Amino acid sequence: MEYTKKVMDHFMNPRNVGVIENPDGYGKIGSPSCGDMMEIFLKIEDGIIKNVKFRTFGCASAIASSSVTTEMILNKTVEEALQVTNKAVVEALDGLPAAKVHCSVLAEEAIKAAIENYLSKNNKKEIE
Amino acid sequence: MKRVYLDNNATTKTDERVLEAILPYFCEVYGNANSMHSFGQEAGKVLDLSRQTISNILKIEKSELIFTGTGVESNNLAIRGIARAYKRRGNHIITSAIEHPGAKNTCQDLEKEGFEVSYIPVDKNGVVILDDLKKAIRKETILVTLMHANNETGVLQPIEEISKITKKNKIVFHTDAVQTVGKIPVYPNELGVDLMSFSGHKFNGPKGIAGLFVKNGIRLGKVITGGGQERKIRPGTTNLAGAVGMAKALELATTNMEEKVKEEEELRSFFETEMVARIPEIKINGKKVARLPGTSSISFKYLEGESILLGLDYKGIAVSSGSACSSDDLQASHVLLAMGIEVVDAHGTIRFSLGKFNTREEMEYVVEEAPKVIEKLRIISPLWNEFYKKK
């Protein structure tokens, strides 16, 4: 099993690691016993994701998937961020080994969870 | 970039003296040891000499050594061979919860053929619980198969004590000694086993050659069918160059062995002491009991093993992981779980296995770099941050 250069780059130099205090949106997906867990923090202004941070417990592809996903949604509208699919995450990493595709699904779910959290806090149900 | 190989339980670098010993047996002496002509006789003599060398070192009879291709093959020939030869006497096999797939999956396969298998648990140090083994014995028990040292933790099993039990109950006893032969002194007759598997590439010999000790008087059913080579137990042309290489490697490994074991233990002790001093929240598995001198299994809490493996690889340090994510089946190590280690900690466990070519300087590099890798990953880990906050 080998990772692409993109995966290794995002694993070794992950973008947007950390937390946002009092985030507008927060999502947590996965569990330690399954071997991977992701947290996403969002700062949203006028429907645009102005800042995003993540923390991930997991393998290299889980870390790389979360890192690349934060890049994909930064400065995008909430609607655009909701369109990010796990397939797009895999493509952005130039591919993932078949056994690791679930990591990209986790990233998609984490983003969705964070946005849902934001929407429910703000009662902006119309976007759903 | 500096490269440090710490995965010697997976395989080892072939010793250059072994390579040199092997080379004439491709283009100069290349006959089939079973042929009657002079080419075959030359090869036959060399094969015989290699068998003699290994038998002398292991203190067994020459006729008790079967050359095979791999450790897994030896395990298959032993376990399936006994199951087939003794099935009229009984259909019960005893093994442990921590076996290498070579033995574990063979036992599981035999279950499909109607054999019943008891998997004996281990204690928290990774040692088989003797009382449970005694209780598992039935009148239908025909075989006990148990590893000598575990490949993931290096923890040694009480083979001598178990052989007393199997002898008393007239049960055939096989040990998978793939991780011990060539690393510590191993003598099948002192262990009291009837069958023993070992493999050349684990002690700086070539890959593709292994051995099976079959005590005189032990019957094995056919597993591979073919010609009469290796007492019909392992038909097929014997790997002449491999046999020469394994004999040479075992000779080299067992020369001044006590000294080498001591040196390796000292090097590991330096490594483990430094790791514990430099990295918080780690645990060395099996540390309280007898282990192989070069194996160190470390659980790094709040991290996942594959990320550690790749982080270390980036620094040129090669290790292996007990985590689910670096295995094909995405399951955490059955060995660590059997020891009662929590799933999340099993995911974060790394095996460092030293070999005879590792130096103090290399280990100094590792204890310098590993803490940086761990720290970097823990910054990303939400579990570490949760723990740190509570603290």
Image (cartoon, coloured by chain):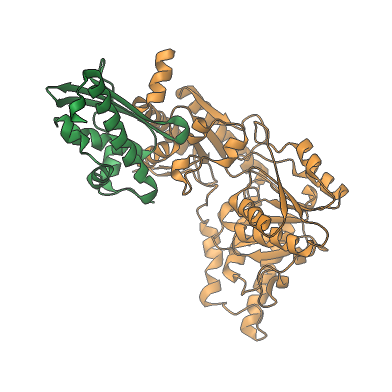
Chain colours: A green, B orange
Q: How many marks?
A: 0
Q: Quadrant of the C terminus of chain B?
A: top left
Query: In the displayed structure, would residue A37 be above or below residue B136?
Result: above
Work out which residue is located at the far right of the displayed protein and give it. Answer: B168
Q: Quadrant of residue B70?
A: bottom right
Residue at left offset 40%, top offset 48% = A99
Q: What residue is shown at x 61% (from left), y 66% (from top)?
A: B244
The quarter of the rendered structure image containing the N terminus of chain B is: top left
Q: Nearer the viewer, residue B271 or B103?
A: B103
Where residue B103 appears, as percent x and y from the top left, is 64, 53
Residue B191 place in picture, x, y as percent: 77, 48
Nearest the eye: B24 or A54: A54
Res B245 → quadrant: bottom right
Furthest-top residue in this view = B391
- Left/right of residue B50 with respect to residue B2 in the rendered view: right
B191 vs B300: above or below = below
Left or right of A28, for residue B254: right
Image quadrant of residue B130? Answer: top right
Q: Nearer the viewer, residue B94 or B285?
A: B94
The residue lying furthest to the bottom in this view is: B37
Residue B311 showing in the rendered view = yes
Q: Can residue B319 be seen from the camera position used here?
A: no
Looking at the image, residue B233 sits to the left or right of residue B297; the answer is: right
Q: Is residue A84 left or right of residue A60?
A: left
Extreme residue toward the front, this view: A126
Q: Position of residue B266 (x, y in %)?
A: 58, 34
